[in-house]
Image (cartoon, helix red, strand yellow):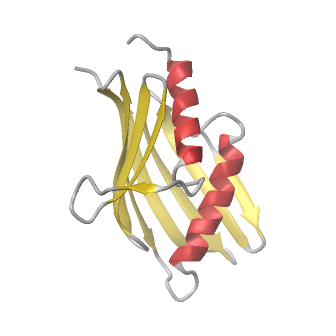
Amino acid sequence: MDFSIDQLIAFIVRAKAATYIGSGEHIASCRTGSHDLQFHKGDFAYLDSYFGGSDFIGEEVVYHADQPVWAMNYYGRILEPTRITAAETGQIIKAGLSTLYQQGRFLGGWEHTVGNDRYFDTNDGDVIAFTGKEWITRDNVKVYELVYHGGLIKN
């Protein structure tokens, strides 16, 4: 690797903040039916490509000098559609993660409260290799969850 782990983390945080969390512009779909967001800075590039809406699956990939170096897969779904909408879920996630990203990180235990809604994110591992889960409770009932995993890509 001709970049440091700290440079990679800083780029991932910046890319995540600028795309989904920052309501970045979607690019043309790279796969039929996908929703794609992209971010570039220097030799790094980021692509988040996902399918679905209230229930969704996707993958984020970071490239350095046009080579894939890091990726994360995720699957999320609304557990209680009578209690929360996809739009409300997105707003809660964006509020929770934007405050996490302001700390310069995207992994590690995190909790954010908005009224009667609580956003949680927990994981094992670090940027090199990790698994995790995020969820939202509304009035102490779990209404949404997402599982994720990822890490460095080595050739």
Locate the N terminus and report the quarter of the image it occupies: top left
Q: Name the one closer to the observer, 43 or 9.
A: 43
Q: Residue at x 63, y 44 (%)?
A: 109
Q: Position of residue 43 (x, y in %)?
A: 43, 22
Q: Name the one closer to the observer, 58 or 127.
A: 58
Residue 44 sits above or below residue 111 on the image: above
Q: Position of residue 141 (x, y in %)?
A: 61, 76
Determine the image quadrant of residue 150: top left
Q: Position of residue 32 (x, y in %)?
A: 21, 62
Locate the C terminus and report the quarter of the image it occupies: top left
Q: Residue at x 26, y 52 (%)?
A: 30
Q: Residue at x 42, y 38 (%)?
A: 46
Q: Name the one closer to the observer, 136 or 43.
A: 43
Residue 25 sits above or below residue 15 on the image: below
Q: Residue at x 32, y 56 (%)?
A: 28
Count of picture labels: 0
- Specify whether residue 61 is in view: yes
Residue 39 sits above or below residue 44 on the image: below
Most distant residue in the top direction: 2
Most distant residue in the bottom direction: 82
- Specify whether residue 107 is in view: no
Residue 22 left/right relative to 111: left
